Structures are given as C-alpha cells and as structure tokens.
Image: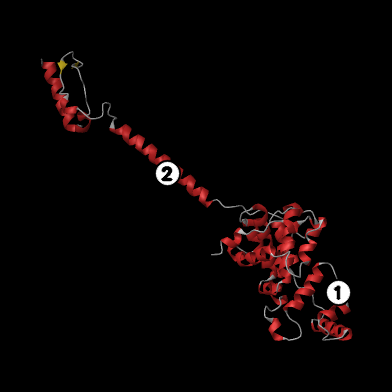
Amino acid sequence: MLKFRKFAAQISTSQRHCPEETKKLKPSVPSSNEFGDCIFVDVEENKSDNPDPVPMFLEETENSRLSEADEMVLEEVEMEDIVEDPIFDIDGCDAKNPLAVVDYVEDLYAYYRKMESFGCVSPSYMAQQSDINEKMRAILIDWLIEIFVPSNSDEKEASVGWTSCYALSMQEKLMLNTLQFNMSFPTPYVFMRRFLKAAQSDKKLELLSFFLIELALVEYEMLKFQPSLLAAAAIYTAQSSLYGFKQWSKTCEWHSNYSEAELLECSRLMVGFHEKAATGKLTGVHRKYCTSKFGYTAKCEPAKFLLQTQA
C-alpha cells in the first residue's frame, strides 16, 4: 500500500507539471505500475472523436513538413517565372574569322544606329516638291527590285514627258554633287544581316524576311520607320508567318534594341502588304519571289493573326 501511495503521488505531481500530456493518456484496460500495484484511469475523460489521436509533437512536425514542401513548390514556380530566354553569343562561332571583325562588330553597329537617322528620307518629303508623286516613286522602286535598271527613255516615260533625257542626266549629277557622293548610309540590308544572325535563321526565314522588307520599300508610308526597325519588323513578321505564333527572343531583342511591342505597328503593315502582294499593277516583288531561285517564298501564308491582336 505504501508503494501504491508513493506512485499515486508521483502521478499527481506529473499531472500538475504536464497537464497536456496527461490528458492524452488513454488506457482502456487496467494497468500495473512498476511496483506491481494495479491502477485505474478514467477512460471517459480521455475520449476523443479521433480513434487514434496523433501526438501533438507529431502533428506539428507533419504540418511543418507540409508547409516547407508548399514553400519549395512556390519557390520553384517563382523561379520558373523569373527564368527568361538566355541571350546567346552569336559571334562566338566567328571568333577565328577575320572578316567577321568580332572585336569591333558591336561598335560598328552602334555607329550604324547613330548614322541611320542622318540618312533617312523625310516621311513627308513628297509635300515639299511637285515634280514627282508617290506613284512615280513606287514604280521606280518596283523596277529596281526586279533587278531591272531603267533607261533614260523609261524614266522619261515615267515622268509623263515632263522632262528630257538630258535634263535627267543633269539632275543626277546635281544630286551626286549635292550629296558629295556620300551615299554609304546604312540601309535595312545592313541591319538585316545582323538581326538574321541573332534569330539563328535558316534559308527559308531569310528569304521571307527579304520578301517582306522589299514589299515595304515600295510603300511611301513606310518611310516613317528607320532602317533598323524595318529590318527587325521584317524578321519578326517572317518568324510569325513561318511558325504560326509570335516569336521574338531575348537575343533578337538585345541585338536589335527593339522589343516586340515596338515592332507591332510596322509588322502589321507588312502583313497587309503581304496579303495584297499579288494584286494591283506593281507586283514586281511578288513575281520575283514566286520563282524557284527565291524558293517560291511569295506563296507563304501571311501572319494574319497579328492583325487580329490590333484591337
């Protein structure tokens, strides 16, 4: 009996110090203590809805593990959102090619970007003179695109008899002297080669890009865009036409200095020119790119979905 009283006292003391743990005890049958004495615990006081209650420290551990797992998932999702397209080194493969001037190529194109604004024609220059109009300009460019060099008689015919062959020759000399024979300003072609390299283009993309840029050259309204933007928009539009979705990589954006949003206005105009390339009187570009030499590129479907996103 003395042993039993001592053990009961120990139980009461432990209950005072650890009431939480005491409440979780749930013996369903009589049990004996270390001294062999039989003790009984009120089962009704420890009944729970859960037949197998989990100890508190296990619940906390499990919840902490779940929260840690959730945090890891969230971190992975956030990392996926942060990861962007890498910017590739497009000049690494030409490091041993002296003609590629890898050491100076970035400086060269920085200079081209600075000089292109000086060589651009004013988008409203037709309003400053009355000798020619937009239609005459389009006819001349259409001739040039077909690799057809007009003779003096052709030029005279285009001017509707307003001038003579001699007067045309004198005007050419005047223009060259006025320009001081400085006609090396960067054209869209200069930027096309660089941007196509950034786009890792193949022959199909290259031909379609040049088809679109030449369609744009005929149109007077495209003078409002700088040569570098025309080149970038042509490649962006060509990619959209070939792949069926908008594509403008970080590498292309880096080397062109144009984002996708900056290209959309020009690109949508190019899609419109592509749609009507086979119609009208000036179809030189379409005929040129309908040949096997140019891979029948003109038959490629235009990226009409770019127009649908305009609204």
- Looking at the rendered structure, the secondary structure element under dot 1 is loop
Q: Residue furthest front?
A: 280
Identify whether 66 is placed above or below 147.
above
Assign the N terminus to one quadrant of the image. top left
Residue 211: give x, y in percent of width and height.
Answer: 74, 62
Name the amino acid type tagged 1: Pro
Q: Which residue is mark 2?
A: 71
Q: What kind of element bears circle 2?
A: helix
Upstream in sequence: badge 1 or badge 2 = 2
Residue that extends furthest to the top in the rendered view of this protein: 36
Type of amino acid under label 2: Glu
Instruction: Tell me: 129 left or right of 58.
Output: right
Query: Around disc 1, counting alpha carbons within 10 Å, would you say few (fewer than 14), some (14 to 19), or many (20 or more)?
Result: few
| Numbered circle sitting on residue 150 | 1
Give the mark toward the camera: 1 or 2: 1
Tell whether label 2 touches label 1 (CB within 8 Å). no
Percent position of residue 114, x then y: 69, 72
Above or below residue 51? Residue 126 is below
